[in-house]
Image: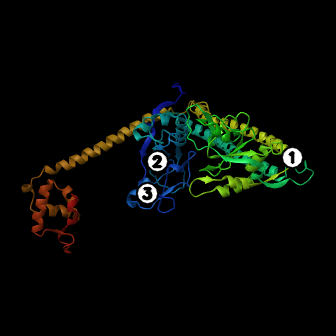
């Protein structure tokens, strides 16, 4: 971003626009709604506070907790997170009961910066990677300390212009959010569409008119269609080229075999013959930690016949390709009804889900005539091609809307989103006043400390021998006849040791007593329990 700024704008740093920046309340959190509601890293959701993602602290010090209460307009900042999520922010809204939890910083802003524009600015520079660039990085986690954070530069437009910009961004980005929400539904809709196509295609419904309502084939076991069902090699493979390429789970793609990530091994003639591939073979994932991948299949084409296959795959070789279309069998295995059977049988509590060759052979599919199989494949591929086209448009639209947010923010912080008003007070003037007030507050604080220090030092003015006989009694009388030891000492001109000596003298005469030891109103009483606090 250029340093050439619109009139009235200025660069400053976070420290200049912050009143405070603090850490959160530490303690063991639970998600059972027991105890004090506190913010967590997950509470920040798309620049908003998500009350469905908060924690609770059951044990805390009641007298200290109030300082952690979150107030409307506070900024929550994720300063410990993965690099991609570092620097996420959210504004605390009105009317919520929430306290500041650990792993988030709380920032409060002074009147030079509107909280909405600051929130948007953090979003803008986070997307540019500026928070990540200055962070300390460890394994899967990055962090920004308060010192580094205070040093970040921030653009400060005139305050009135900040509000105009924030209002405009609120309006425009709300429309972007609506568009993104609608777009996010498309992948789910396309998935349902493809499943519906497969369901109607493999049940006979898709081709009902084409068949003129004739019977839709017969139910057969997959095993009856094959001449061979075989597991792959268990031989260790490496990325060192040489020997033969071996297809593995990563090579079973959504649209067929993907041979880009190949491993290699040496095989003898017998192994090559047993594990070789032919066009029309079907390779199926038999074992995986994800049950959704078990049973995933791809057809071997003429481009894949020079490879062998690994042990977590099963090869189906069909008896007669003039009667069986492998693509039809593939679509049948992908259909919702067969997927349901595969996943039920494959699920395991061990963490590894599996389907064996016998279970695979026993799967039952509907097998129409070869001519109808070919027509089903043609229609399914045509409908899938339409879905692919829509998916491609969705991908492009999503990229555009994702870029649109950052584009609008960039335009806003170039001063191009709303018109400037020459009557707006420049940001520099407002910041000067704030800095002057800060200096005055610091000076007043320093003065109070000096006065307190002088008051303590004056205790050496009077010597013990110079003190009148009823010195402390007279001072207690002035204090209403009763006081604690600290107040009485502050009233004297004695050093602390001389004060204790004089107090002992006057208590021995009975002129001063412990406030709990006498009910005689004529006696001067001292709260001796407070002596240890001096």
Quick check: can you spot residue 428?
no
Q: Choose mark 2 or mark 1, whichever is in front.
A: 1
Query: In the figure, residue 69 lies in which quadrant?
Result: bottom left
Q: Which residue is mark 3?
A: 28
Q: Which residue is mark 1?
A: 372
Other residues around mark 2 within 10 Å, as few (<14) / some (14–19) / many (≥20): many
In the picture provided, is 302 more to the left or to the right than 206?
A: left
**Quadrant in which the N terminus is drawn:** top right
Query: In the figure, residue 532 lies in which quadrant?
Result: bottom left
Q: CA distance from mark 2 to mark 3?
A: 15 Å
**Residue 378 percent across, percent down from the top left:** 83, 41
| Label number found at residue 104 | 2
In the picture provided, is 405 more to the left or to the right than 452?
A: right
SS for dot 2: loop
**Residue 102 percent across, percent down from the top left:** 44, 51
Write the residue at 7% across / 55% down.
466
Q: CA distance from mark 2 to mark 1?
A: 62 Å
Q: Choose mark 3 or mark 1, whichever is in front.
A: 1
SS for dot 1: helix
Other residues around mark 3 within 10 Å, as few (<14) / some (14–19) / many (≥20): few
**Residue 151 percent across, percent down from the top left:** 42, 35
Of all residues, the one furthest to the bottom in this rendering is: 519
**Quadrant in which the C terminus is drawn:** bottom left
In the picture provided, is 403 more to the left or to the right than 144?
A: right
Please tell me which residue lies in front, 312 or 387.
312
């Amino acid at each position: 971003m250029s340093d050439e700024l619109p009139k009235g704008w200025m660069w400053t740093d976070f420290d200049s626009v912050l009143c405070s920046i603090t850490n959160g309340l530490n303690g063991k959190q639970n998600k059972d709604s027991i105890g004090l509601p506190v913010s967590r890293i997950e509470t920040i959701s798309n620049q908003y506070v998500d009350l469905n993602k908060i924690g609770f602290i059951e044990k805390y010090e009641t007298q200290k907790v109030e300082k952690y209460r979150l107030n409307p307009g506070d900024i929550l900042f994720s300063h410990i997170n993965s690099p991609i999520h570092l620097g996420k922010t959210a504004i605390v809204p009105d009317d919520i009961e929430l306290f500041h939890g650990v792993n988030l910083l709380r920032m409060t802003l002074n009147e030079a910066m509107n909280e909405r524009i600051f929130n948007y600015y953090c979003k803008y520079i986070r997307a540019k990677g500026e928070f990540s660039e200055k962070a300390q990085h460890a394994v899967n986690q990055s962090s920004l300390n308060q010192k580094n954070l205070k040093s970040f530069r921030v653009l400060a437009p005139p305050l009135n212009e900040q509000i105009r910009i924030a209002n405009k961004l609120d309006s425009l980005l709300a429309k972007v959010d609506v568009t993104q929400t609608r777009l996010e539904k498309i992948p789910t809709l396309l998935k349902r569409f493809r499943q519906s196509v497969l369901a109607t295609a493999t049940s006979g419904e898709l081709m009902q008119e084409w068949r003129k309502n004739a019977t839709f084939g017969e139910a057969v076991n997959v095993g009856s269609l094959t001449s061979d069902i075989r597991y792959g090699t268990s031989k260790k493979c490496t990325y060192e080229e040489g020997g033969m390429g071996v297809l593995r789970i990563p090579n079973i793609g959504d649209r067929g075999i993907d041979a880009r990530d190949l491993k290699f091994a040496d095989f003898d003639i017998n192994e090559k013959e047993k594990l070789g591939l032919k066009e029309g073979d079907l390779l199926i994932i038999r074992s995986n930690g994800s049950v959704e991948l078990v049973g995933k299949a791809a057809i071997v084409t003429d481009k894949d016949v020079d490879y062998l296959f690994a042990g977590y795959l099963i090869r189906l070789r069909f008896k007669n390709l003039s009667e069986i279309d492998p693509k039809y069998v593939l679509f049948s295995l992908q259909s919702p009804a067969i997927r349901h059977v595969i996943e039920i049988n494959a699920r395991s509590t061990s963490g590894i889900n599996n389907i064996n060759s016998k279970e695979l052979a026993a799967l039952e599919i509907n097998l129409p005539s070869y001519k109808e199989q070919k027509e089903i494949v043609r229609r399914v591929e045509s409908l899938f091609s339409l879905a692919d086209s829509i998916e491609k448009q969705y991908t492009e639209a999503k990229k555009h809307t994702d870029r649109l947010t950052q584009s609008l923010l960039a335009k806003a912080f170039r001063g191009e989103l709303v018109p400037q008003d020459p009557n707006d007070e420049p940001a520099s003037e407002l910041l000067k006043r704030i800095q002057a007030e800060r200096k005055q507050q610091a000076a007043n604080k320093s003065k109070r400390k000096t006065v307190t220090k002088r008051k303590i030092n004056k205790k050496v003015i009077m010597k013990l021998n110079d003190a009148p006989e009823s010195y402390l009694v007279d001072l207690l009388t002035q204090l209403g006849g009763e006081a604690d030891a600290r107040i009485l000492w502050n009233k004297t001109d004695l050093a602390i040791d001389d004060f204790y000596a004089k107090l002992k003298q006057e208590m021995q005469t009975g002129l001063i007593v412990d406030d709990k030891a006498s009910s005689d109103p004529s006696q001067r009483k001292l709260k001796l329990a407070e002596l240890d606090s001096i």
